[in-house]
Amino acid sequence: MKMLFSSLISSQIRFLLHGLNDSNFDSNFDSVVRELCQFIEYGYEASILLLQTCLDHMNFHGGDMNDMQLKPDVLAAIFRYLLDKPNFSTVLCEALRSSVIGEGFLGEFCNVLQFSVSEKIGLGLALADSENGDVRTSGQNFCMRQIEKLCGNPASIDSHEKIQKIIMFLYQSEGLSKHVDSFMQMLSLMEFKERPPFVLAPLLSDDLHEDSFSRNLDLFYDFSENEFDSILAEMENDTSMADIMRELGYGCTLSTSHCKEVLSLFLPLSEVTLSRILSTIARTHAGLEDNQNSYSTFCSAIGSSALSDSSCLSCWNVDVLVDSIKQLAPGINWTLVMENLDHEGFYFPNEGAFSFFMSIYARACQDPFPLHAVCGSVWNNVDGQISFLRYAVAAPPETFTFAHSIRKLAYTDALHGQELPHGQANQAWLSLDLLDVLCQLAERGHAGSVRLMLEFPLKHCPEILLLGIAQINTAYNLIQREVSSTVFPMIIGNVMGSGVILHLWHSNPKLLVHGFLDFIKSDQGNMVTILDLCQELKILSSVLEQIPFHFSIRLAALASQKEYASLDKWLNDCLRTHKDVFFEECLKFLKEITFDAADDVSANSFQHSGAGMNINEETSSIFWKVLQANTDQIASKQLSEELKSLHRASMHVSPRLQNVGASDSSTSDVYTNDIEAEANSYFHQIFSGQLTIDSMIQMLARFKESSDRREQSIFECMIQNLFEEYRFFPRYPEKQLKIAAGLFGRTRSKLAGLNSLCHISKVLD
């Protein structure tokens, strides 16, 4: 199977290559190369087959490159595509396994394919990774030859820029990035005719330089004003200085004079450098291993006069460190130092590290900590930012305070004679800057960490947290909603709760409405509480406008019963504005209170237990009358028909509704009111469970054969009602629909010969 797969791929590749000729090369080149490169996605073996087949067509294996069957542009394009694949070195070495590799071959190969200097060096480095010793040596020598030509260029500045470009080329090509170390080592062996742009005797040990590409860039020397050079030189200072101080240990701060000796090796001290040093020192404030040997060796190397024994120190000496920095860099901007904390490696593992860091800042600068440095935006190093904020919000005010926050919660006055609790003394939860960045962090995948920080204010000052977070607006308002749903049950009914809610209504009405809805959803009985609160704060009409119809209809019905609002006016206004959408929601409401009433019949009211509310018949009648009066406002005929059907069904449940909209009932035009009322009473009894299906069938059979004209009229009225109603049975609630189906199914045999009823039965079946 494997051989068959390889054969198929090879055949397809050859077919594509043979299809390219002089006549169609320009027009078909891009599409053919695209198709060829797709084989690389099949994996390692397909990539090797592709490269080998292209080399065969250019006769590279045969050694005679003058007899090429394929233009070099195709192979060059495929070669460059492979550079970005992590297995490039392996694929290249395997594809060239049968070729005789030497510097002459490589030189001609690169010239034919018109490789750039960077690509030539990349080719040499890839072959230098070969398992074959000869190929490896050829690749290394070829690479060294290219570097030698580059470094021997009299135009030294130009060559320096090319070397920088080569490094970036290697780093950005996934297939070559692992060879950066090898290139740097080769480069360090070269002798430059001009002053070299690199520090060829690296300060750090070789094993440290092998850690990452950023460490290799420490070799750069600040030679020119080129921005790239400056950045690399800065990286060399920042990284090596912090790492060296950590390696040497607490002895670096043995005395001011000795600390200055160490720091002076890395002058000038910049804010970026100090930011990294301070974060490293804070992270290792205690428990650092004793590196006495490394420390003594270092002191000897720099000719330091410091005491050789630093084992007496168990932590960094803050006073010595800060005094040394101030003497070496008196103009340092400490705000800028804090603004550069967002760097890789910054992290506080515990509260001790945070407190130690803040003690350094307090010793160095008398100004309040610049909060915008940690609360102004989400960092790139999110974990480091969260570690800072976690300990900052819990710190005592003498260690860290948010009292000077630019955006601060202003509403802290007394409510109903009581002061709102401010939470912690450092005023963290009055800071809108803090709350803003916490909400942003939560929406970027760190909600768990943010929730842990909010546990304290949710327990000790929930009102303050809610008031503050109501003033924050983010893309999804995730934490805002969570806090609202958690705090609302705490403040509803609280002495100061109405004052907090009124303030929320003015600052963030949308959040308040969401809080109301969450509170109602948790327990439908809470709707009465919300209604009374809205009435007290005089915001009922505005709340009704902002909540969904499902809730506003129920709230308005309750408000009408408590005489807080005029239901008919509100319904008419909403129907004129929202028409069919509102009409349909009203129908759903009426259906619920009507058919749920069948489960708990009362002479005076409909009990809608699911909504935790009692809707009396007077309120229900208002809905019926307003809807029937506004059928001309809606465009859907289906909704009008459904209203009529629902009204007839409601009369089965409660005959007391028979006079509401009686003119719309077709049976009322044929039968007298008393006949209609008695027919409806029987439907009411069967749908409410007071009358069984068998009893109803027997009664209908008796009325049908009765010599009493009144009983015959009742029978005919009931049959006509059923005939008119059958179209709407699919919209009945499940319980009532089952009763209707049972009634028709068992009536067919008892009342045979009634064509209309039999027809209905067939439809239901």
Image: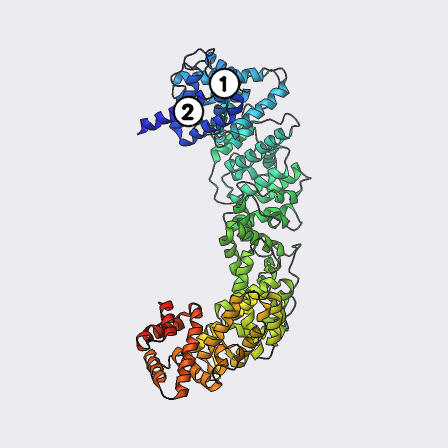
**Which of label 2 and label 1 is nearer to you?**
2
Where 529 falls versus 677 (above or below)? above
Please state if 84 lies on the left or on the right of 11 as rendered: right
Residue at image position (43%, 17%) is 57
Residue 423, x across and y down, in percent: 58, 62
- Neighbor class of circle 2 (other Cα within 10 Å; few <14, some 14-19, many 20+) is many
- The residue that label 2 is drawn on is 13
Residue 675, x across and y down, in percent: 45, 85
Q: How far apart are marks 2 and 1 (CA)?
A: 16 Å
Please state if 731 lies on the left or on the right of 500 as rendered: left
Residue 542, x across and y down, in percent: 63, 68
- Neighbor class of circle 1 (other Cα within 10 Å; few <14, some 14-19, many 20+) is some
> The C terminus lies in which quarter of the figure?
bottom left
Where 706 falls versus 275 (above or below)? below
Kindly state the secondary structure of the residue where label 1 is placed: helix
Residue 7, x across and y down, in percent: 35, 25
Residue at image position (59%, 76%) is 567
Residue in front for this viewpoint, 459 or 147? 147
Where 596 falls versus 479 (above or below)? below
Residue 272, quarter of the rendered image: top right
Under mark 1, the amino acid is Pro
Residue 72 shows which numbered tag?
Answer: 1
